[in-house]
Amino acid sequence: MDIPQLKAYFTGLQTRIVAALEAFDGHAFKTDAWERPEGGGGLTRVIEEGAFFERGGVNFSHVMGARMPASATAHRPELAGRRFEAMGVSLVLHPRNPYCPTAHMNVRAFVALKDGEAPVWWFGGGMDMTPYYPWEEDVRHFHGTCKAALAPFGADVYPRYKTWCDEYFFLKHRNEPRGVGGVFFDDLGADGQVSFEQAFALTQAVGDAFVPAYLPVLEARRDVPYGERERDFQAYRRGRYVEFNLVFDRGTLFGLQSGGRTESILMSLPPVVKWRYDWHPEPGSPEAKLYDEYLRPRDWA
């Protein structure tokens, strides 16, 4: 596992994505470098109250630890007790305009270490989109870009990772998906069936596809007028985002359990959010359209 090669890619990806987002918004991201007492650190890039983004963060982290956290060993119990090293880029973007979807992307590499044994490494990541008032062409563009990025790795890869995303970003207690999905993968390379070079190349393809998948959607909808009704529904639906991140998201749980930097981990949460008791959209309304037509798995690409 070539740590310098990985770090060069991940830090470069963060720089490129932030530059594209700053050009789109017109405001600069704050830069916050941090160190972790247990080992490693990172660079948090955050925008709040920008011209377009209400909140957004693009984080790079490279952390080490003496013992694998519970969130990592829950599905890989054979790795309990090993040292670990983890690195990657994670981002969440919350536009102010309710007609522009929230988006998430993460690409990461992980290695579990034990004296006298070969390192166990794997890659993971993906991206997904969470609209409030969606357009079908936007969802098709997002999924189509993901499909094209994964095409060089086999015709079966996008369908598998798309299904994996639908299953992962699902709120079991609500019995509904978080949004319209995208792609998601984990443990790539852990079984020895894929080489480091192949796994790293696929991970790079996903990371590099985020800007062309997401920014054209924002360009198309950034000037759509909205009012208090749309903002209110956006705040309500953002509650689902909070619920998923705090209850199910493995990246959030890993970060908190491994002693990560809380401010950087929780920058993914939206700044304005609401919950209501047993609320349902009026049948036939624009809000109901999200539930009826989009919050269900479809072959978007």
Image (cartoon, grey):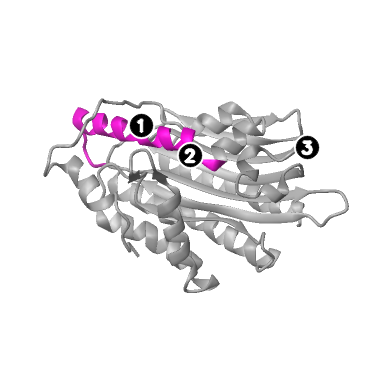
In x, y percent, where is residue 261?
63, 29
Helix, strand or loop at mark 3? loop
Q: Main secondary structure of the magenta part?
A: helix
Which stretch did the figure color magenta? Answer: 223-250
In x, y percent, where is residue 23?
46, 43
Q: Residue furthest right?
A: 116
The answer to which of marks 2 and 1 sits earlier in the sequence is: 1
Say whether residue 218 is visible.
yes
- Residue in front for this viewpoint, 196 or 277: 277
Rate crowding at label 3 as few (under 14), some (14 to 19) or many (20 or more) other CA atoms within 10 Å: some
- Residue in front for this viewpoint, 205 or 238: 238
Residue 50 is tagged as none
CA gap, disc 2 to disc 1? Answer: 14 Å
The magenta stretch spans residue 238? yes
| Image quarter hosting the N terminus | bottom right
Residue located beneath label 3 in the image: 66
- Residue in front for this viewpoint, 111 or 286: 111
Q: Is residue 266 above or below residue 78?
A: above
Residue at image coords 57%, 26%: 263
Amino acid under disc 1: Gly
Residue located beneath label 1 in the image: 239
Residue located beneath label 2 in the image: 248
In x, y percent, where is residue 248?
48, 39
The answer to which of marks 3 and 2 sits earlier in the sequence is: 3
Amino acid under disc 3: Ala
Within the image, what quadrant is residue 118 found in? Answer: bottom right
Observer-side mark, 2 or 1, equals: 2
- Say left or right for 189 vs 230: right
